[in-house]
């Protein structure tokens, strides 16, 4: 001490950050499950989803065939439930829990890693909001594309008729790609795969390329939906389709 | 700035933990080679604020004045760093001095950093050599091992890495980079490795290594240039290997 002043009141021992609780709690398991679920199965599904949708670049026929293939998988409901819905829900909810317990401090420490830390939270949140909206529109309302694969292409095209929806798609693809690419980098660093500084830097370039690849594939896929003349959403699409009103009758081929 | 005739300091004061903090401004005559600690010493010699009001000297921790004891860490212009190596000429004025925000304030700029000591105890950050008889000399370490261990041994327990960490707070109770790096140091020591399993198991508890968000502020603020992000990656890998191995072994 440089001066001899002493506290005038006893220091409260209850405030401040608590020390490590060795041997207590389950946060290790839950956090590592969050981390792993981002790669498998959520990340793996993202790859499948981008690849499948990229079939749109080969025309509505190829796209319908791909949708048909996916919908013809055995136990497709359980595959989706345990391979996609529940993992995404867990990854998202635990992700928000992580976010709310952290304290962003980029104003005082405006460094690249800290910005990426903050952006990982924002891109995750935006991607999740997008995913909820996207699945609701494309999967749980309107024509059921699993039973009517040939309606899928037209259904996406209808979505793109709204400028805001189109922008949200672009934003969703960007955020999901970013979150996945940096998530890969984080996974490698935190699970002790890329321990050295040089290894982490090298893998950073790889992840940047992966992110760019996803964004490019997503953009090309979107372009195919926009450049192809509006496809019918099929005779079975029926009157329940919430987008039916958006289609000019002339665009219906049947 | 025109001519450095004077140095302006804005210091957050708090007489005791139970009262609200407030700011006081001080103006000192500039002279070459000033640092934050020497400025605080000058204020102690003449504790008068800029407005001419006589006040108490500023309370702060300090000892070595050459960045090896770790005592004088504080927030300088919002950023965690050592006050002794913070040169006035390189700082934007007024120089804003605050106590660490995530540690209980004792008085003014002095905070209670005992959480780090508790964390080091929790991971058994020592080499176990207690015995009832002479254990003889320890195993030899290769030059390579020594060179890897030495940077880790430079930790001065200043807690800058913890203060700057977005994950280190009362909600997470995150252990912080310093402790994780010490686990690496003692696990790589040939005799210290006897406690390796216990240390890694401790880091799996609540507030353990899993809370790291890899924002990498720790390695940026560390005054001793300790490769903290590397330590987190290495220990993170060891922890995972043990956790997965235990699924089959235990």
Image (cartoon, rainbow, N blue to C red):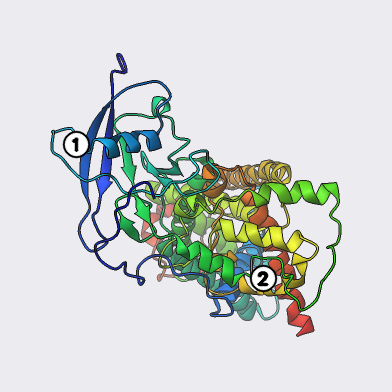
Would you name the residue on which mark 2 appears? B199
- Tell me the residue at 44%/55% (across/down): A126
Q: Is residue B13 above or below residue B1?
A: below
What crowding class fits label 1: few (fewer than 14 Cα within 10 Å), some (14-19), or many (20 or more)?
some
Task: Give the percent coordinates (x, y) of residue A20.
Answer: 52, 70
- Seen from the viewer's position, the closer of residues B72 and A94 is B72
Residue at the bottom extreme, as displayed: B250
How many numbered circles are shown?
A: 2
Q: Residue B117: in sight, yes or no?
A: yes
Where residue B48 is drawn, which disc sits there? 1
Q: Residue A66: in sight, yes or no?
A: no
- Tell me the residue at 72%/41% (across/down): A198
- Tell me the residue at 26%/44% (across/down): B57
SS at badge 1: loop
- Seen from the viewer's position, the closer of residues A192 and B175 is B175
On screen, residue B39 versus residue B233, left or right, reads: left
Chain identity of mark 2: B
Task: Give the percent coordinates (x, y) of residue B47.
Answer: 22, 38
- Seen from the viewer's position, the closer of residues A30 and B23 is B23
Chain identity of mark 1: B
Q: Is residue B8 above or below residue A52?
A: above
Task: Give the percent coordinates (x, y) of residue A41.
Answer: 65, 68
Tag 1 and tag 2 share a subunit:
yes
- Tell me the residue at 49%/55% (across/down): B162
Task: Give the percent coordinates (x, y) of residue A36.
Answer: 64, 67
Where residue A113 is drawn, which disc sits there? none
On screen, residue B161 versus residue B245, left or right, reads: left
């Amino acid at each position: 001490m440089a001066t001899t002043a002493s506290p005038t009141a006893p220091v409260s021992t209850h405030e401040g950050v608590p020390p490590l609780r060795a041997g207590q709690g389950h946060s290790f398991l839950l956090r590592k499950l969050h981390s792993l679920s981002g790669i498998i199965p959520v990340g793996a599904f993202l790859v499948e989803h981008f690849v499948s949708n990229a079939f749109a670049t080969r025309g509505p026929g190829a796209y319908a065939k791909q949708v048909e293939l996916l919908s013809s998988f055995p136990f497709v409901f359980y595959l989706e439930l345990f391979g996609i819905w529940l993992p995404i829900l867990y990854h998202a909810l635990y992700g928000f829990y992580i976010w709310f317990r952290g304290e962003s401090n980029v104003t005082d420490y405006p460094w690249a890693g800290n910005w990426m830390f903050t952006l990982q939270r924002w891109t995750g949140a935006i991607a999740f909001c997008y995913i909820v909206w996207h699945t609701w529109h494309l999967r749980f309302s309107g024509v059921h594309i699993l039973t009517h694969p040939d309606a899928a292409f037209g259904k996406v095209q209808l979505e793109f008729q709204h400028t805001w929806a189109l922008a949200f798609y672009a934003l969703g693809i960007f955020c999901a790609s970013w979150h996945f690419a940096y998530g890969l980098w984080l996974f490698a660093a935190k699970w002790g795969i890329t321990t050295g500084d040089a290894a982490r830097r090298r893998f950073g370039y790889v992840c940047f390329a992966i992110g760019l690849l996803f964004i490019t594939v997503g953009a090309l896929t979107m372009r195919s939906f926009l450049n192809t003349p509006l496809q019918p959403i099929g005779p079975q699409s029926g009157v329940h389709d919430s987008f039916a009103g958006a289609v000019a009758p002339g665009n219906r081929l049947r | 700035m025109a001519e450095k005739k004077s140095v302006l300091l804005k210091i957050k004061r708090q007489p005791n933990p139970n009262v609200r903090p407030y700011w006081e401004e001080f103006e000192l005559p500039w002279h070459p080679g000033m640092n934050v600690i020497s400025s605080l010493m000058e204020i102690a010699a003449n504790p008068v604020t800029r407005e001419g009001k006589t006040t108490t000297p500023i309370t702060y921790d300090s000892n070595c004045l050459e960045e090896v004891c770790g005592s004088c860490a504080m927030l300088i212009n919002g950023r965690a760093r050592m006050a002794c190596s913070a040169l006035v000429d390189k700082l934007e004025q007024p120089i804003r001095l605050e106590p660490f925000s995530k540690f209980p304030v004792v008085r003014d700029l002095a905070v209670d950093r005992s959480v780090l000591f508790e964390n080091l105890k929790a991971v058994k950050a020592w080499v176990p050599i207690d015995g009832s008889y002479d254990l003889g000399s320890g195993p030899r370490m290769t030059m390579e091992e020594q060179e890897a261990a030495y940077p880790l041994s430079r930790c001065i327990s200043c807690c800058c890495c913890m203060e700057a960490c977005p994950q280190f707070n009362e909600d997470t109770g995150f252990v912080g980079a310093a402790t994780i790096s010490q686990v690496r140091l003692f696990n790589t020591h040939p005799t210290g490795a006897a406690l390796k399993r216990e240390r890694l198991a401790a880091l799996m508890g609540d507030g353990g290594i899993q809370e790291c968000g890899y924002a990498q502020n720790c390695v940026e603020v560390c005054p001793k240039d300790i490769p903290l992000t590397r330590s987190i990656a290495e220990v993170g890998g060891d922890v995972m290997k043990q956790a997965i191995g235990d699924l089959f072994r235990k």
